[in-house]
């Protein structure tokens, strides 16, 4: 779980890091004494868990937590404070937990265990695999679509990343210039029926002249890549929805972005090593 620590007292940051250094499943990806620096980091990187001091000069921990939640609604927020008076404010902004200073290793272990439980509850049922061949999984099992066209329509909607896809785009991409209305109407019904079979019909939205999928209900290797996840960046090997020719332009976009991301990662690791 990618974790950031934010506290204006450097000693407290070092103490927390020292006490949780040997705990599995947690990777401290950033330590910040400046809340604005934490926001800038989170805007370009995956952050699953944030431990925040509340009483800080300038931007306090409550304001920082609100800014982080705007960037990523599912981020786990835990406050560390020496002042019980802040507990009510923390609860009002729906923090996941509060730890009081001075804390010991048992306190930290409790925080970490709660964070792991929350992360497991937040995992989404639906996952899209886009690097290589396209596939959709629900509860870890590959979806068996009613037809190849229904699967391709799902892929096209995912390619648009939640943006509406017009009927014209659907017909042009799936059937070409000779597509007919009966074909796309049948395919839309097949896709809707497939999603209903898997209890996932709420993610498919139809409106007059267009379709879209709710990507907030799913995760994907593409989303992780765009969020800066290093594992996802390495997983991309130049293939994206490879069974569909209309997806080819994305390969070049992702390849360029990967090169930039790898360069930034290399620079960051060099600075960290120095």
Image (cartoon, rainbow, N blue to C red):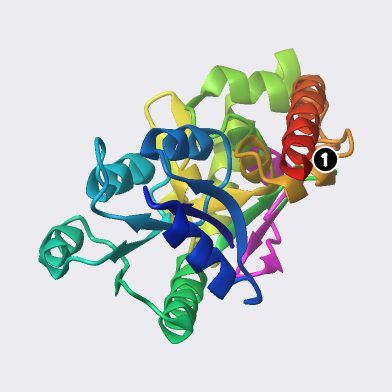
> Residue 216 versus residue 52: which sits nearer the camera?
52
The spot of residue 7 in percent (x, y) is 38, 52
The spot of residue 228 in percent (x, y) is 65, 39
Q: Residue at x 18, y 64 (%)?
A: 91
Under circle 1, the secondary element is loop
Q: Is residue 161 magenta?
A: no
Provide the residue span drawn in magenta.
Answer: 136-154
Q: Is residue 123 visible?
A: no
> Residue 28 versus residue 225: which sits nearer the camera?
28
Q: How many marks?
A: 1
Q: Quadrant of residue 246?
A: top right
In the image, farthest residue toward the front: 11
Left or right, 4 with respect to 147, comes to left
Q: Residue at x 56, y 34 (%)?
A: 44
> Residue 271 versus residue 145: which sits nearer the camera?
271
Q: Residue at x 38, y 52 (%)?
A: 9
Q: Is residue 139 magenta?
A: yes
The spot of residue 171 in percent (x, y) is 64, 23
The spot of residue 180 in percent (x, y) is 64, 23
Left or right, 23 with respect to 11, comes to right
- 68, above or below 28, in the image: above
Q: Is residue 205 visible?
A: yes
Q: Residue at x 76, y 24 (%)?
A: 260
In the image, farthest residue toward the bottom: 106
Q: Quadrant of residue 108?
A: bottom left
- 158, above or below 17, in the image: above
**Residue at numbered disc 1:** 236
Q: Quadrant of residue 125?
A: bottom right
> Residue 251 versus residue 232: which sits nearer the camera?
232
Q: Residues within 10 Å of mark 1 (few under 14, many from 20)?
A: some
Q: Quadrant of the C terminus?
A: top right
Q: Quadrant of the N terminus?
A: bottom right
């Amino acid at each position: 779980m990618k974790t950031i620590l934010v506290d204006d007292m450097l000693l407290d940051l070092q103490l927390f890091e020292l006490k949780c250094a040997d705990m599995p499943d947690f990777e401290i990806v950033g330590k910040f004494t400046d809340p604005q620096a934490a926001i800038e980091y989170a805007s370009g990187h995956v952050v699953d868990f944030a431990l925040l001091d509340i009483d800080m000069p300038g931007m306090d921990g409550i304001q920082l937590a609100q800014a982080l939640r705007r960037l990523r609604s599912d981020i786990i927020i835990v406050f560390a404070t020496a002042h019980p008076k802040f507990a009510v404010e923390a609860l009002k902004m729906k923090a996941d937990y509060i730890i009081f200073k001075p804390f010991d290793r048992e306190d930290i272990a409790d925080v970490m265990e709660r964070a792991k439980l929350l992360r497991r509850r937040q995992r989404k049922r639906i996952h899209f695999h886009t690097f290589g061949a396209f596939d959709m999984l629900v509860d870890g099992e590959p979806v068996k679509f009613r037809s190849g066209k229904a699967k391709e329509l799902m892929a096209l909607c995912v390619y648009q990343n939640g943006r509406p896809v017009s009927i014209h785009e659907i017909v042009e991409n799936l059937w070409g210039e000779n597509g007919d209305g009966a074909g796309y109407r049948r395919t839309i019904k097949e896709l809707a029926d497939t999603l209903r079979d898997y209890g996932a019909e709420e993610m498919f939205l139809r409106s007059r002249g267009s379709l879209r999928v709710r990507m907030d209900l799913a995760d994907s290797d593409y989303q992780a890549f765009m969020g800066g996840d290093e594992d996802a960046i390495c997983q991309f090997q130049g293939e994206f929805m490879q069974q569909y020719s209309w997806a080819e332009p994305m390969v070049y976009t992702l390849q360029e972005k990967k090169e930039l991301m790898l360069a930034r990662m290399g620079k960051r690791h060099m600075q960290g090593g120095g």
